[in-house]
Image: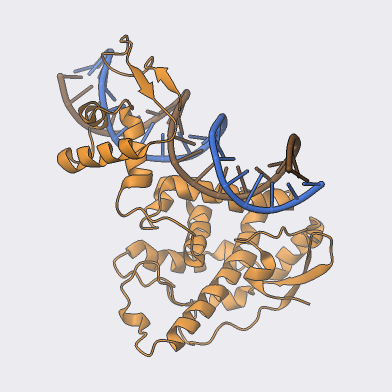
Chain colours: A orange, B brown, C blue
DNA sequence: AAGATCGTCAACCGCCATTAA
DNA sequence: ATTAATGGCGGTTGACGATCT
């Protein structure tokens, strides 16, 4: 644990010899902060830092509270539903992490940002393309999201078959998605194989990667999200689906693009979250 | 077994917008 | 109207555990 002299950007006292702590928070510090917030509430972070007796900046206290200590902060694996939301929202909003986080209850902008950088951008690096490029957007749209949808659908089917009381219409739980396919409870048909022959590691194990066709996408009629309180979640998928420029673009065009860019030889990494075999489950 | 490399994530930094004096 | 304080955001760093060589 290190400390540093308060030197910039702060109010009176910056000339004092007071040392501020930095680095990981201790249990004692967390307890102090929680106690102080329970007494005085959130906000006025500099004042709060002073009152608490913590040798931390107000900013540091705010960050610790919002990203870690706040009771509704959700931790742990990001579900396929959440992954899909992040992908969709990022395609619409770009790197506006806080805006994206607003639509994922319990997730912080920091967590989403980390997720994007460590998981999503990694895939872009493997593909040797810019994560912000149109090409990568297409990969997300035509490969990852359809696969995530299918995964969600399968999960949802499993859970519904194990629960006779399952009623998607009445669900009010946030981020409890239902399939895009409102007219059918069955999973979408297996996407047509696309000539994207990924292979892992030594090349001993090959997999063919498929994607949902644009016509399948056009069949989407309802939001996959059951959070009836969120206008955005109800509408954004519809808006996305209605995006002429994206969804009327024939997959064959993308296939051509993929071939032209040599993505057909993409060596997919064996990653737990983004393991293509695990996620897309199409093996030859 | 040990060092190197990689992946994850908490925390910090700097900038900008807003608010209060 | 101006200025300083504050809060919020996105980019980046660094510690640390896991995995690889």
Report whether A117 appears left or right of A69: right
* Depth check, front residue: A86 or A236: A86
Instruction: Give me the residue at 48% from left, 50% from top.
Output: A112
Report whether A9 appears left or right of A264: left
Instruction: Give me the residue at 57% from left, 75% from top.
Output: A150
**Residue B18 image point, x, y percent:** 27, 34
Residue lying furthest top: A15
Report whether A13 appears left or right of A279: left
Q: How many numbered discs sit on the rendered protein?
A: 0
Residue A242 shows in this picture:
no
* Depth check, front residue: C14 or C4: C14
**Residue A272 image point, x, y percent:** 62, 61
Q: Quadrant of residue A209?
A: bottom right
**Residue A249 image point, x, y percent:** 64, 66
**Residue A127 image point, x, y percent:** 73, 53
* Depth check, front residue: A51 or A12: A51
Instruction: Give me the residue at 16% from left, 38% from top.
Output: A40
Task: Identify the image quadrant of the N terminus of chain A.
Answer: top left
As displayed, is residue A203 above or below residue A214? Answer: above
Task: Identify the image quadrant of the C terminus of chain A.
Answer: bottom right
Instruction: Give me the residue at 38% from left, 14% from top.
Output: A7
* Depth check, front residue: A184 or A113: A113
Residue lying furthest bottom: A164
Residue A77 shows in this picture:
yes
As displayed, is residue A249 above or below residue A42? Answer: below
As displayed, is residue A183 above or below residue A205? Answer: below
């Amino acid at each position: 644990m290190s400390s540093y002299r308060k030197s910039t950007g702060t109010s009176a006292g910056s000339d004092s010899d007071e040392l501020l702590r930095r680095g990981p928070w201790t249990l004692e510090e967390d307890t102090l902060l929680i106690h102080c917030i329970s007494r005085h509430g959130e906000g006025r972070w500099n004042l709060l830092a002073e009152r608490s007796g913590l040798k931390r900046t107000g900013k540091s206290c705010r960050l610790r509270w919002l990203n870690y200590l706040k009771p509704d902060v959700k931790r742990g694996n990001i579900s396929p539903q959440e992954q899909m939301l992040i992908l969709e929202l990022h395609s619409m909003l770009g790197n506006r992490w806080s805006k994206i986080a607003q639509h994922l209850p319990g997730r912080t902008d920091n967590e989403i940002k980390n997720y994007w950088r460590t998981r999503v951008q990694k895939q872009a690096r493997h593909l040797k393309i810019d994560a912000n490029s149109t090409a990568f957007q297409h990969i997300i749209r035509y490969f990852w999201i359809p696969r995530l949808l299918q995964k969600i659908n399968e999960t949802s089917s499993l859970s519904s078959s194990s629960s006779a009381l399952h009623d998607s219409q009445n669900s009010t739980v946030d981020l409890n998605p239902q399939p895009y396919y409102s007219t059918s409870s069955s999973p979408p048909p297996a996407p047509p194989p696309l000539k994207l022959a990924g292979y892992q590691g030594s090349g001993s194990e090959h997999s063919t990667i498929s994607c949902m066709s644009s016509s399948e996408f056009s069949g989407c009629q309802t939001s996959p999200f059951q959070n009836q309180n969120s206008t955005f979640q109800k509408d954004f998928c519809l808006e996305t689906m209605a995006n002429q420029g994206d969804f009327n673009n024939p997959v064959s065009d993308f296939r051509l693009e993929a071939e032209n860019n040599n993505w057909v030889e993409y060596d997919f990494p064996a990653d737990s979250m983004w393991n293509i075999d695990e996620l897309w489950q199409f093996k030859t």
